[in-house]
Structures are given as C-alpha cells and as structure tokens.
C-alpha cells in the first residue's frame, strides 16, 4: 500500500504503507458547491427548497417545485496559500474553474387523483461536491533533514532488504548514496554535516468529488413534503510533491543537494442515500429534517517515488527502469449526516434559513479489498486510530434572501464546517469559514444568478518529524447560474 510522511493532516500521512486518518478526513470533509443562489446563501436550503441544489441538503426541497425546471452553473476562482516555515513566508496561487452543476426537475400534477398529493417531482443531474485543486509551497532553513528520517527508518535492516520494506523512501536514499550503511551497528548515516539545510517543498493536488443523482419527491397538501435522493459519487485525487534540500555548509561532505519526488493517484466510486421532510408550520415558518447515509466507496490507488542527489562532481538519480510503483484496492466508508433546518419567509420580501448538521467522523472506516487480485488487509489499527482521533463535528449554514422589488434578489450567507479532530494540539487546524453573497433576476421563464464566496481556513503541514509549516488558505469562487422554467 501507499507511502506517506508523518501526520500531515490535510495534505499527507506517515512513514507507513497503509491508508490512514488523513485519507478518511480528505474524502469526508466537504464544503458546499452548487447553484449561484445556493452558494450566495451559504448552502442553507434545508427548510426552503425550490432550488436545483437543495436536494444536496434535503431531497424534500424538490417537493416545493410546481413547475419543471432545468439549469446549469459554472464556477471560477482562485485558491491562495500563504505558508510560514521557519520565519519565511511563501505564497502560491492556483486557478479554479468548471461546471458546478447541471440538473433538472420534472413536475407532475397529481392533484386530480384526490389522495392529497398535489405534485410529484423527478429530478436528477450532476453536482460538484468537492474540489481538490490546490498548490502550496514553503521554503526555509533548518537542521533536521528528510535524510535523517530515511536513515532512522532503515535501522536494523540490511541494504538488500530496503527495496522490499522501504522501496519508496530509504531504499531510494541508499541507492543514490545519500545514506550509507554501517555494518557494525546495522545502522545508517546520512552524508550531511552539522550544518543546516535549505528546505523547499511544493505540493500540488488536483481532482475532486463529483456526484450524479436521481431524486423523487412529493407535495402533500402544500403542507408536508417528502423526498429521497440516490447519489453515485466519483473520487479523483492526484497529489505530487517535490522536496528539495540544499546544504548551507558543504565542508566534509561531497553532497550538495537532493530532490525527492512522490506521486499518488486515487480513484473511487461510491453511493449514498438521502431522505428528508419539510413541514410548513405556517406559510411563513418552515421546518426541515434530512438524513444522509454514509457513502460506501471502492477505491484504487497507485503511487511512485524517485530521488536525485547532486554531488560536488556528479549526480546520482533513480534508474527510470527501477522507479518503484505500487498499487492497491480497498474499500472505505465515509460518515453520514443529520441535518435540522428552520426557515422563515417574510411574505414577498425575502426569507431566512438556518441549517445545523451533525457529522460523526468516527463513522469513517476502511474495509479490506474484495478484489481477488489483491491481498486482504484488516485495517484494525487504522480504524482504531480513526475512532480515537475523530469526533462529531457541527456544521452551520445560514442564508438570507431579500427582494427589493419584483424579479430582483439580493442574497448573503455564512457557513462553518466544524473541526473533525478531538485534539487540536496533535491536529492543529481551524474550522472552515465561508462568507458569501450574490444577486439574481427572475422572469416567468428564466432566471440568472451570480454569487461569490470566500473560504478561510488554517492547516498545519508536517513533512516529517519536527518539520512543520503553517498554511493559511483563502479560496474565492464566483458562480454563474442559468435556470429555465417550463
């Protein structure tokens, strides 16, 4: 299985050959993305409905439609990261863009059947659930080196064993000569001296989580609305990082610098079910409740690594034909959600919605592969760690819409995606905070909306023991939506 370094929280893992809590967190921790109206109102639609993205929150929201609707949304923006490492601040930017959603709702008038069901709705389409595209870089000077980790990892192993037990790390260092074997003590030492190293690491991620869904809902006497949504999700995550270290003092060693590169590709498919209800206490006051089941995935991963060392008079690189490559299949369960919502509609002047989500990250677990081509693995240790470090997170979404005059809308929203880890010292990271707003126009046959949201969050990135960088991320996304009514 794959190889990562230390506990990297959001961006990496540890010197082991297994999936860990970082992977569970990455694929479980999602924000909100959809129509411009949905984005502008902070994703708060659990008791309002009647938006093409509302089925993501509460499938009963489609029950509020009395006319068929189709629409699509595009988004674009930028992810900016400021990294602080050993007092040096480095900034990196990454452009974003694509299709946020393309969905439809087909409405059937069932009022003549006389059973209390006035309308039923069949919906479906595509939603972008999460975007992984992100790049950050840090640089700075410190004494501790990645080579120290490789040397310590190889302790008590003979050189001929390294390609079996540590093909993606210590063996690469040994083959390029940056660590050397000491037969008398079965230990390894690096070619470093007592000086500092200048570290330069760039981490690039691309991919995302997409969902294709089908939804069915009903309107009972314009008072009670039920809905169910089946979603099929696809994960695609690619990570590449390059770690470079350059000696500040070359006395007593021929080594000048080295580069270590790691690549990971993860793909998966999974499904979940969402069910929900909306109840109109009065025409103005509305309550919503939705339950999302866990998502069950089948995952496939491939990974590789290489290394180059530069000496005073030569260069040593991993032989292209000997670059180690790994692959593994496994299964994964991501946590479900319970969402309680309340909304108030101010006649024809606007509305307010508040959604509170409870999400127990301890439900996130790995399961052994059921692919006969791969050796089973029980994941007992990894799942026990997940049970220990995760907790139930509370997510909050608040959205408001104001109608200054007929056909024109002004919107604003706020969202907080809560902390998933119990120990903020061992896993130093903030909650994710979103601030959003937008405007829209609507006629009898068409509506157009535009929104902008900004996410603020902080993460800690640990490349290896005692090598930590603080990452401050700002994500800005603009979304444009066109809806057609028929």
Image: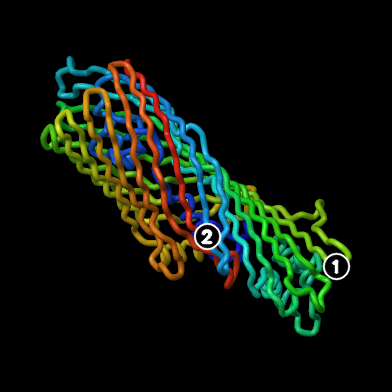
Q: Nearer the viewer, mark 1 or mark 2?
A: 1
Q: Is residue 321 visible?
A: yes
Q: Earlier in the sequence, mark 1 or mark 2?
A: 2
Q: Is residue 407 above or below residue 191?
A: above
Proximity of marks 1 and 2: CB atoms separated by less than 8 Å: no
Image coordinates of residue 176 in percent, x first then y, are: 80, 64
Circle 2 residues within 10 Å: few <14, some 14–19, many ≥20:
many
Q: CA distance from mark 1 to mark 2?
A: 39 Å
Image coordinates of residue 161 in percent, x first then y, are: 76, 69
**178 left or right of 36?**
right
Q: Is residue 166 above or below residue 102?
A: below
For the N terminus, the image quarter is bottom right
**192 left or right of 208?**
right
The residue closer to the viewer here, 287 or 424, is: 424
Circle 1 residues within 10 Å: few <14, some 14–19, many ≥20:
few
Q: Is residue 1 visible?
A: no
The residue at the point 80 percent across, 84 percent down is 184
Quarter occupied by residue 413:
top left
The residue at the point 35 percent across, 46 percent down is 435
Image coordinates of residue 67 in percent, x first then y, are: 27, 19
- The numbered dot on residue 240 is none
The residue closer to the viewer here, 404 or 291, is: 404
The residue closer to the viewer here, 341 or 456, is: 456
Q: Which residue is mark 1?
A: 312
For the C terminus, the image quarter is top left
Disc 1 element: loop
Q: Which residue is mark 2?
A: 20
Quarter occupied by residue 207:
top right
The residue at the point 85 percent across, 67 percent down is 312
């Amino acid at each position: 299985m794959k190889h990562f370094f230390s506990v990297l929280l959001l961006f990496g893992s540890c010197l082991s050959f297994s999936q860990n809590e970082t992977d569970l967190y990455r694929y479980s921790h999602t924000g909100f993305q959809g129509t411009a109206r949905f984005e502008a109102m902070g994703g708060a639609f659990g008791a309002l409905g009647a938006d093409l993205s509302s089925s993501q929150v509460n499938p009963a929201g489609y029950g509020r439609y009395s006319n068929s609707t189709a629409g699509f949304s595009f988004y674009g923006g930028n992810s900016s990261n400021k990294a602080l490492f050993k007092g040096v601040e480095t900034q990196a930017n990454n452009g974003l863009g694509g299709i946020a959603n393309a969905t439809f709702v087909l409405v059937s008038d069932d009022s003549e059947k006389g059973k209390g069901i006035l309308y039923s709705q069949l919906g479906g389409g595509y939603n972008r659930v999460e975007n992984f595209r992100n790049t950050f870089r840090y640089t700075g000077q410190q004494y501790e080196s990645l080579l120290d980790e490789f040397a310590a990892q190889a302790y008590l192993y003979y050189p001929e064993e390294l390609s079996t037990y540590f093909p993606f790390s210590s063996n690469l260092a040994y083959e390029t000569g940056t660590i050397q074997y000491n037969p008398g003590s079965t230990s390894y030492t690096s070619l470093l001296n007592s000086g500092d190293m200048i570290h330069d690491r760039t981490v690039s991620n691309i991919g995302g989580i997409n969902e294709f869904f089908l939804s069915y809902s009903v309107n009972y006497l314009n008072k009670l609305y039920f809905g169910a949504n089946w979603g099929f999700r696809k994960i695609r995550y690619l990570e590449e990082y390059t770690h470079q270290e350059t000696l500040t003092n070359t006395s007593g060693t021929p080594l000048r610098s080295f580069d270590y590169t790691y690549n990971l590709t993860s793909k998966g498919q999974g499904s979940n079910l969402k069910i929900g209800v909306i109840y109109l206490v009065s025409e103005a006051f509305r309550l919503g409740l939705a339950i999302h089941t866990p998502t069950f995935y089948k995952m496939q991963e491939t990974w590789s690594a290489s290394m180059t060392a530069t000496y005073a008079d030569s260069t040593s690189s991993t032989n292209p034909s000997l670059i180690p490559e790994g692959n593994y299949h496994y299964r994964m369960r991501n946590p479900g959600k319970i969402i309680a919502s309340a909304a108030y509609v101010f006649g024809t002047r606007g509305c307010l919605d508040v959604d509170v989500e409870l999400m127990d990250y301890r439900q996130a677990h790995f399961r052994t592969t059921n692919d006969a081509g791969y050796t089973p693995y029980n994941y007992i240790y990894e799942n026990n760690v997940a049970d220990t470090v995760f907790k139930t997170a509370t997510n909050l979404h608040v959205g408001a819409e104001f109608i200054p005059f007929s056909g024109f809308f002004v919107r604003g929203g706020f969202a907080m995606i809560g902390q998933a880890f119990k120990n903020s010292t061992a896993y130093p990271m903030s909650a994710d905070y979103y601030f959003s707003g937008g405007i829209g126009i609507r006629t009898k046959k068409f509506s157009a909306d535009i929104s902008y949201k900004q996410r603020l969050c902080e993460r800690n990135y640990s490349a290896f023991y005692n090598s930590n960088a603080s990452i401050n991320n700002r994500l800005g996304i603009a979304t444009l939506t066109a809806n057609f009514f028929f």
